[in-house]
Amino acid sequence: QVQLVESGGGLVQAGDSLRLSCTASERTISNYAMGWFRQAPGKEREFVAAISRSGKATTYPDSVKGRFTISRDNAKNTVYLQMNSLKPEDTALYYCAAKFSLLDGMVTDKNEYAFWGQGTQVTVSS
């Protein structure tokens, strides 16, 4: 069982930046594909970013591409989400997710992730 704990959320103004962190309880997360998702009130949970086990491959939806960057430090069991040029529509509860994987690929489907954190709130004011 992998426990994930997100941190770094907060209230910011449009145009500001935030860096979210996700720390895993597992001895090593190098065997896990990792992802970030978000969920706004009344909306479905949506994909934000994914990174492969090695960190060599990343992918994003068009809504955040060029503004958000996912990275990982396997030695620290931590995944990051750097968010720049934040917009009010980025306001949501942000979740970290992990999927055990034998391959060094990315996972964008939330239904494929087995482990989730409790979320950290990001609120962007206009």
Image: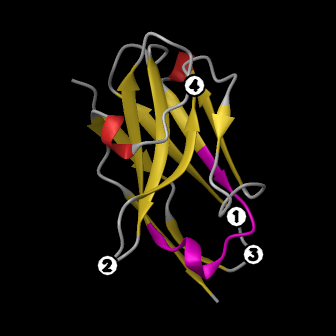
The Cα–Cα distance between marks 2 and 3, rounded to whole angstroms, is 24 Å
Amino acid at pointer 4: Ser
The Cα–Cα distance between marks 4 and 1, rounded to whole angstroms, is 24 Å
Of the residues under marks 2 and 3, which one precedes in the sequence? 3
Residue occupied by mark 4:
52
Residue 110, compared with residue 27, is above or below; it is below
Amino acid at pointer 1: Ser
> Which region of the structure is painted magenta?
81-92
Q: Which mark is residue 42?
A: 2
Tag count:
4
Amino acid at pointer 3: Gly
Which residue occupies 69% across, 80% down? Answer: 14
Q: Which mark is residue 15?
A: 3
Of the residues under marks 1 and 2, which one precedes in the sequence? 1
Q: Closer to us: mark 1 or mark 2?
A: 2
Quarter placement of the C terminus: bottom right
Mark 2 neighbour density, 10 Å: few (under 14) some (14–19) many (20 or more): few
Tell me the element at label 1. Answer: loop
User: Are circles 2 and 4 on residues that touch, CB within 8 Å?
Assistant: no
